Structures are given as C-alpha cells and as structure tokens.
Amino acid sequence: MSERSSHRKGGKTGRATVIVAAGGSGTRMGGGKAKQYLLLGDAPLLVHVLRRFQDSPGVGRVILVVPGGDIPYVRREIVEGFGLAKVSSIAPGGSERQDSVGNGLSLTGRDDEVILVHDGARPFVPLSLIDGIIDASYGTGAACPGIPLRDTVKAAGENGYVRETLDRSRLWAVQTPQGFRREVLLKAFRKAEEDGFYGTDEASLVERTGHPVRVIPGAWENIKITTREDLLLGEFILNRWKEIS
C-alpha cells in the first residue's frame, strides 16, 4: 500500500506501544477457526491488523494478545511468517477482553509512555488515524476515535415500547485504537479490579476515574469484522486500497 504515516510531532516517533487484543477463541463465523485467523485476501485477518502498526512510524512496538494455546502457532505462522518485527511480546488471553488487555498491559514498563489498545478484528485503521490518536493521547491522556451517528436512535423500555428519542448530535459509535498515557490506563485498570467492574472498552474504565476522554473523528473503513458479511465488505475495502495504491 502506498499510504504513509507522517507522525513526527514533538519527537514522539516510535514511542507509542500498541496492545492488539485478539484473545477471543470464538468460531461463530464457521470453518472451525477463530475469526482472527480467517483469510482476508492473501493473508489472515490478524496479519492485516498487525501490518497497520508495522507500517506506522509512530508505533515503537506491539504486544499481541491471543489465546494461550495459540501462542506457538501465532509466533511461527503469523509474526515470523509475515515478518512482523514490531511484535515484541505475545501474551495469553483471559476469560474476558478486559482480562486480555490487562495481560498485555502487565508487559509494559515506564518507557511505554503512551499505550494504544486495538481490536484484533479491525484491519483497516488508517495510518493517519493512528497518528491522531497518538497525538491526542499525549495531549489529553486519553482519546478514542468515533463516528457520529447518522440514524435516529431511540431508547426502549423492557416492554419494547419507546421510552425516548436520543439526541444523536451528541452520540458517537466508538472505534479503536484507543490511546492513553500509561499511568492513566494503569489507574483505570486498578480501580476496575478493586470494584469488580468490567467495561465494554478501555475508555469506559478511564471515564470511571474521572479523567476526561477526548473523541476524535474515526474512519468509515475502520470496521470490526464480526460476521461473514463483514468479511465480504473487508474484501471490497482491501481490493479498493490495492486499486489506489
């Protein structure tokens, strides 16, 4: 691909660490394989995800989280097989996504100033978006990308009847990577563990500590592959990128 990152602000090139959360072992999409290993074009889905950070000058290293039993296969066939040199560590996944990210976070140190957390099923994050999250994370301590909702959104009660129509001008569909200064994310994980709280994303953990989270514009192509239909859309995006490269 011809896309190139231009992240050079403040001399921070290469100082972001990415945790890629691919610890799920579900095979609901069929074929007997976890979705992160399904082919997308000429390579497994997870390879496309890791290539985005391999190509980003703003990223120094990647901590990959996969099911514990898959580590030898992933190291041999994914990381070494595709020359993904920025993957410095592979951690075992936990019972929940939050546990998996926590396992990855435990492998970071003080030199990891900013931590990005990315879904292992989002293979099309633009390099410019990675740059934007890194910059926003250094600036505010916590940031996530999002897409403003276009559809009318209604909240319904348990009986299925509409309770209210929400103001969509203030609603965002949140994506990853989400970025944080390391101390902000560590504090959020410690509080969540103390409270026995599990959130749907890392930003929700940070929000509970009272630290503000900045939302920056995401990208329409930064989709999460969860269904067979998503794979078809992924093939379209991949072919489109090849055409314009």
Image: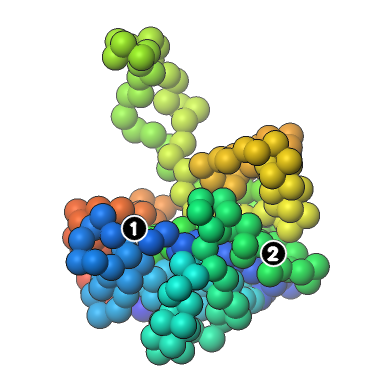
Q: Position of residue 32 (x, y in %)?
A: 24, 66
Camera-side residue: 57 or 22? 22
Q: To which residue does mark 1 refer? A: 26
Q: CA distance from mark 2 to mark 1?
A: 24 Å
Q: Residue furthest right?
A: 110
Residue displayed at 44% across by 20% down? 167
Label 1: element kind: loop
Residue displayed at 69% across by 48% down? 189
- For residue 16, above or below residue 29: below
**Quadrant including the C terminus:** bottom left
Query: Which mark sits nearer the N-terminus, 2 or 1?
Result: 1
- For residue 230, above or below residue 157: below
Q: Position of residue 106 (x, y in %)?
A: 69, 64
Three-letter code for the amino acid on which mark 1 is drawn: Gly
The numbered mark at residue 235 is none
Q: Is residue 11 left or right of residue 199?
A: right
Q: Is residue 211 left or right of residue 244?
A: right
Camera-side residue: 64 or 216? 64
Label 2: how many Cα within 10 Å (few below 14, some 14–19, many 20+): few
Camera-side residue: 42 or 215? 42
Q: To which residue does mark 2 refer? A: 106
Three-letter code for the amino acid on which mark 2 is drawn: Ser
Q: How is the image coloured?
A: rainbow
- Residue 75 visible in this rendered orientation of the protein: yes
| Dot 2 and dot 1 residues touching (CB under 8 Å) | no
Label 1: how many Cα within 10 Å (few below 14, some 14–19, many 20+): few
Task: Examine the image and state in which quarter residue 182 appears.
Answer: bottom right
